[in-house]
Structures are given as structure tokens and as C-alpha cells.
């Protein structure tokens, strides 16, 4: 008769696979890279399940977290272990999970939350266009209409309402976070009026008006966007008396006079739109007016990996592009602006200080 030894308890995953301390070899790096979708999907799953919100300041087991987020404990443990390999959550020696700086950013209530950005960058339509990147590289054109039968923004607003809401929340988070950095950076001495062209809901403008109580400002964007302007800038808002809102297409005309024009994260579309917008600023502005163009750059930035990924996604969805420092300098100069300093705004944005020639 054979004796059957009792099944040993499962070895904790963290004990069996200590986190690597040395960078992996090239072959392993490539294996990891081609599984990039698994990483993005794991972050998306954690954000959708709300695991980071469920985890408090004390470590918790997968079992406890599973009960809170209504998931199965074993697969949740696998998900959390996969994420902790990349520093999103960490496993304690007794097999519990605790927050890290990165996992806290998935919380909805974190002041620097990236929850909606994480969801936006992994929305269902992104998984449908990425496999066509080779086609986009061959043709230099967006693949969105081929995949979805219509342009990106039409699809978003007509067929993907949930995605459109995520988009709005992601853009709001992103622009509120960078607006404070822009307001801190910009020297407003001698400036009495500022115009934010393609300024979205006006977070940058509101931050500047809050910084300088004597400043007046104009927000220009498309009608549907300015209709949802930041509450500080309209109705009974605290800054309404110093704000003018202009609904219009900056590729057609920019009917705004100001000492300082801001053009932030809009020159990412086709070249013709970029040229027309910059020329319209030059046509509208008085000689000596300042124009500050703010963009992510695909080179010369600590955020190169992130920006190049956005650049490829822009190619896929709207046929747009992020700039190199040189490509932006060329377009700004071609429009007739004089370029001064190029300075970092934060870890991922650069400001090009320009002047309208006399
Ligand atoms: C990526 S968002 C940037 C918003 C804002 N500048 C910021 O950095 O937070 C691009 C903005 O350009 C605006 N936009 C796009 N086409 C435009 C046009 N033809 N005229 C004016 N604004 C436009 C969009 O509505 C959107 O608010």
C-alpha cells in the first residue's frame, strides 16, 4: 500500500518568486515588452475593480480585498502579484498587500490621481487600433475610420458614451494637475491680459487668474467645450468678472487681443491645423505680445517613453503627432514667431517662450 502524504499548503507566491533586483537580460526584457498588454490590462483591471480605493493604510490579504471589491480571492491575488512586480502595490513577507506610491495614484481620492488617465489609455478602442500600427506606419495615416467606420471623435461621442465620460474626466484631471505647474512657471510681470487658445475647460486660465488678482483672461475653445468651462470662470464663479469666453475654431480665426497667449497641448493634430493656428495667433496679436507654446516632446525629456507611446496612439486615432523640440521650433518659426527660452514646466511638459515680432 502506498502512503499518500498530505498535500502541502501552497507556497506563498512572494516567497517562491522574490522580486528581481537586477535589470533583466535582453531576452527577458523583450519577453516582458511583448507582454506589455498584460501590464496595461492589469492596471486597468485594478482601476476598474477599485482595489486601490479598497486598500487602506494597513496591509490586507487578497481574501479581504476580494470581499471588498467583489472578486474571487485567488485570481485577485494573481493580479496583485503581477502588479507588485512593477511596484504597483507591494507584498509583505506574510503575503498581504500594501500600497506603494504608484498604487496610491490609482485611488480616486488621491490629489494626484491617475485613475481616469489609466482607464482612458486602456479604453476598449485602444485595444482595437494598436494591432493596426504597422498599417499606420506604412501609410502615415490614422486607422480609426477603417476599424470603426467613422472618425475618432464622432465614434467617441456617438458610440462610446462611457469612454467619452472617461475621456472628459481624464482630460480634466490631467489639465488641472498641469495647470498649477504652468501657473507657477509663468512670469506674469507686465502682463495684464492672457488668452488660452484651445484652453479646454479653462483650468490653466483659472490658475493664472488666481495667481494674479489684477489679471484678465480669455478662454477660447470649441463651443461644446467652453459650454462646460470651469465653474470658477462662469455664472457666479469667483473669476467670472475677469473672464471672457470665446467659442470658436482657432484654425479659422483667433479674435482675441492679449499680452500673453497660451497654446497648450493642441498642436498635436495635422500640420495644416498647426500652421493655421500659429499664423492666426500672429495675425491677432500686437507686436511684442508673448506666446507660450506648451507641449510634451518625444525627445529631450524624462518622459520620453510615455510621450512616444502617446505619439503612436495619436497617429492611430487622429493621424496626429507629438513633436520633437526641432519640429516644434520649425513650425513656430515658420509662423513668424521669435523663439526665446525653452524650459521644462514639469517632468513631461516643455514651454516654448515666443514673441510676436515688431
Ligand atoms: C488636449 S486638449 C488641451 C486642453 C488645454 N489646452 C490643456 O492643456 O489642458 C486640446 C484642446 O484643443 C481644443 N480644440 C481642438 N480643436 C480646436 C479648434 N479647432 N479650435 C479651438 N480649440 C480646439 C479641444 O477642444 C481641447 O480642449
Image (spheres, rainbow, N blue to C red):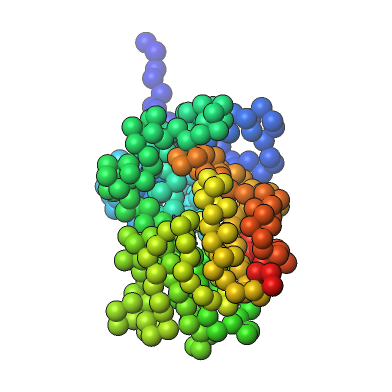
Q: Which image quarter is the N terminus in?
A: top left
Q: Is residue 116 left or right of residue 281?
A: left
Image point 48% across, 51% down: which residue? 89
**Image spot of residue 314 (x, y percent):** 50, 43
Image point 64% across, 33% down: which residue? 29
Residue 90 visible, this orientation: no
Classify the position of ligand 1 by quadrant: top left, top right, bottom left or bottom right: bottom left
**Can you say whether 19 is above or below 239 in the image?**
above
- Judged from this view, the residue extending furthest toward the right is 340
Q: Is residue 291 left or right of residue 158?
A: right
Q: Is residue 47 left or right of residue 345?
A: left
**Can you say whether 133 is above or below 43 in the image?**
above
Q: Which image quadrant is residue 239 in? A: bottom left
Q: Is residue 36 left or right of residue 223?
A: right
Image point 63% across, 84% down: which residue? 189
- Judged from this view, the residue extending furthest toward the top is 1
Residue 157 visible, this orientation: yes
Q: Which image quarter is the C terminus in?
A: bottom right
**Image spot of residue 120 (x, y percent):** 41, 48
- Nearer-the-camera pick, 307 or 115: 307
Total count of labels: 0
Image point 58% across, 78% down: which residue? 259
**Image spot of residue 165 (x, y percent):** 31, 54
- Nearer-the-camera pick, 30 or 290: 290
Q: Which image quadrant is residue 59 in? A: bottom left
**Can you say whether 321 is above or below 113 in the image?**
above
**Image spot of residue 20 (x, y percent):** 63, 41
Amino acid at each position: 500500500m502506498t502512503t499518500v502524504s498530505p498535500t502541502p499548503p501552497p507556497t506563498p507566491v512572494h516567497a517562491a518568486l522574490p522580486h528581481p533586483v537586477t535589470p533583466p537580460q535582453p531576452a527577458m526584457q523583450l519577453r516582458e515588452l511583448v507582454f506589455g498588454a498584460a501590464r496595461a490590462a492589469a492596471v486597468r483591471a485594478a482601476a476598474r475593480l477599485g482595489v486601490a480605493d479598497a486598500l487602506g493604510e494597513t496591509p490586507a490579504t487578497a481574501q479581504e480585498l476580494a470581499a471588498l471589491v467583489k472578486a474571487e480571492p485567488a485570481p485577485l491575488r494573481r493580479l496583485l502579484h503581477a502588479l507588485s512586480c512593477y511596484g504597483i502595490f507591494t507584498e509583505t513577507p506574510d503575503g498581504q498587500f500594501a500600497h506603494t506610491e504608484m498604487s496610491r495614484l490609482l485611488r480616486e481620492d488621491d490629489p494626484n490621481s491617475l485613475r481616469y488617465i489609466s482607464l482612458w489609455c486602456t479604453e476598449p478602442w485602444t485595444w482595437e487600433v494598436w494591432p493596426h500600427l504597422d498599417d499606420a506606419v506604412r501609410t502615415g495615416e490614422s486607422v480609426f475610420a477603417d476599424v470603426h467606420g467613422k472618425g475618432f471623435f464622432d465614434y467617441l461621442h456617438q458610440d462610446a458614451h462611457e469612454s467619452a465620460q472617461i475621456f472628459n474626466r481624464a482630460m480634466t484631471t490631467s489639465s488641472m494637475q498641469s495647470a498649477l505647474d504652468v501657473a507657477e512657471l509663468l512670469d506674469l510681470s507686465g502682463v495684464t491680459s492672457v488668452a488660452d487658445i484651445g484652453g479646454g475647460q479653462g483650468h490653466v486660465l483659472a490658475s493664472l487668474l488666481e495667481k494674479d488678482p489684477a489679471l484678465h483672461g480669455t478662454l477660447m475653445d470649441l463651443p461644446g467645450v467652453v459650454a462646460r468651462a470651469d465653474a470658477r470662470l462662469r455664472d457666479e464663479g469667483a473669476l467670472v468678472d475677469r473672464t471672457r469666453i470665446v467659442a470658436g475654431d482657432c484654425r479659422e480665426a483667433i479674435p482675441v487681443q492679449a499680452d500673453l497667449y497660451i497654446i497648450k497641448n493642441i498642436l498635436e493634430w495635422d500640420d495644416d491645423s498647426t500652421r493655421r493656428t500659429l499664423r492666426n495667433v500672429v495675425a491677432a496679436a500686437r507686436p511684442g505680445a508673448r506666446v507660450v507654446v506648451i507641449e510634451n516632446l518625444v525627445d529631450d525629456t524624462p518622459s520620453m517613453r510615455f510621450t512616444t507611446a502617446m505619439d503612436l496612439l495619436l497617429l492611430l486615432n487622429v493621424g496626429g503627432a507629438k513633436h520633437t523640440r526641432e519640429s516644434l521650433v520649425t513650425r513656430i518659426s515658420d509662423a513668424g514667431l521669435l523663439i526665446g527660452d525653452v524650459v521644462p514646466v514639469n517632468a513631461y511638459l516643455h514651454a516654448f517662450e515666443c514673441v510676436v515680432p515688431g
